[in-house]
Image (cartoon, rainbow, N blue to C red):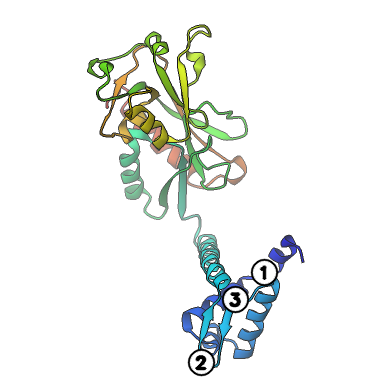
Amino acid sequence: MDETSMAAALELKHLRCLVAIMDTGSFTDAAHELGVSQAAVSRTLAGLEGLLGVRLLHRTSRSVAPTATGVQTLARARILLAGADELVREAATGRTRLHIGHAWSAFGRHTTEFQRRWHEQHPDTELRLIRHNTPTGGLAEGLCDLAVIRAPVDLRPWSHARIGHEARYVALASDDPWARRRGIRLAEIPGRTLAIDRRTGTTALDLWPEEDRPEVEYTHDIDDWLAAIATGRCIGLTPQATAAQYRRDGIVYRPLRDAEPIPVHLIWRAHTTHPATHTAIALAAGLYREYDGAPRV
């Protein structure tokens, strides 16, 4: 049997049987918990071992213990069963959990207030913020219902709404000579080495003429980016949200005086729109409007 056929033949009852045996410690007690006969428990476990082609339990007349493969299978079984139970619960009660993904910072300085107001105004819909270092903040990977996007990604495959704008800041080592200044101009950057996250960053070299662009050091994620800047070998350009959510010893943020602000979007799948999508958009956009004056750090 190939892997596809094996997965199709695998049933939740196989996994529940394995978990019940291990949690109760015996086939007899597992049968009682599952409401079936001991013979049915034995047949179900044998069916699972036959499907996987491995032995999962060491059985004697007095004890049951997992094999090395059984330990791994048991852990995965618990995760799969928890997911299945959650799916059933949500289907029975409505969509009760909203996942919002983001690559670096969620709603920046508005994040805490967004969470607070959401919990006050929508207590029946649990909110979870997920950081995932991909261009769509986990949406393309199926990890969230909505995603906050600042990077210049192609929005055409997604439904989207602009919720606000954020000013750009320069991230510097705290002992950098520029750290004593109140602001920095775009034309000064080409004299420095610029840290850029090529996957999820918001900075592109087309901010400068082709003949006058800074040297670049590419990084892999926010932590890598911050580390490169803290050493003093690089500086970074970033939205105000990063300055608000990633304060670090050894790093300061100064306004970039003459660059266009960065648009902030929420994106989602048109064919599987979460019922709370437009409520989240309205709340986020309202928070950005409240702070539409001079950016604060």
**Left or right: 42 in relation to 205:** right
Circle 2 or circle 1, nearest the eye: 2
Cα distance in 3D space between marks 2 and 3: 17 Å
Of 109 and 238, nearer the camera is 238
Cα distance in 3D space between marks 3 and 1: 15 Å
Of 292 and 198, nearer the camera is 198
Of 7 and 211, nearer the camera is 211
Q: Secondary structure at mark 1?
A: loop
Q: Give the residue at x 42% y 20%.
A: 194
Q: Residue 66, position in %: x, y?
A: 53, 77
Q: Quick check: marks 3 and 1 in contact, CB under 8 Å?
A: no
Q: Residue 131, position in %: x, y?
A: 44, 43
Q: How many marks?
A: 3
**Left or right: 106 in relation to 293:** right
Of 19 and 195, nearer the camera is 195
The answer to whether one can see residue 105 in this image is no
For marks 3 and 1, the one nearer the N-term is 1
The three-letter code of the residue at mark 2 reads: Arg
The three-letter code of the residue at mark 3 reads: Leu
Q: Which mark is residue 62?
A: 2
Q: Residue 111, position in %: x, y?
A: 34, 39
Cα distance in 3D space between marks 2 and 1: 29 Å
For marks 2 and 3, the one nearer the N-term is 3
Q: Give the residue at x 56% y 77%.
A: 18
Q: Give the residue at x 31% y 40%.
A: 113
Q: Quick check: marks 2 and 1 in contact, CB under 8 Å?
A: no
Q: Kindly identify which residue carries mark 3.
A: 56
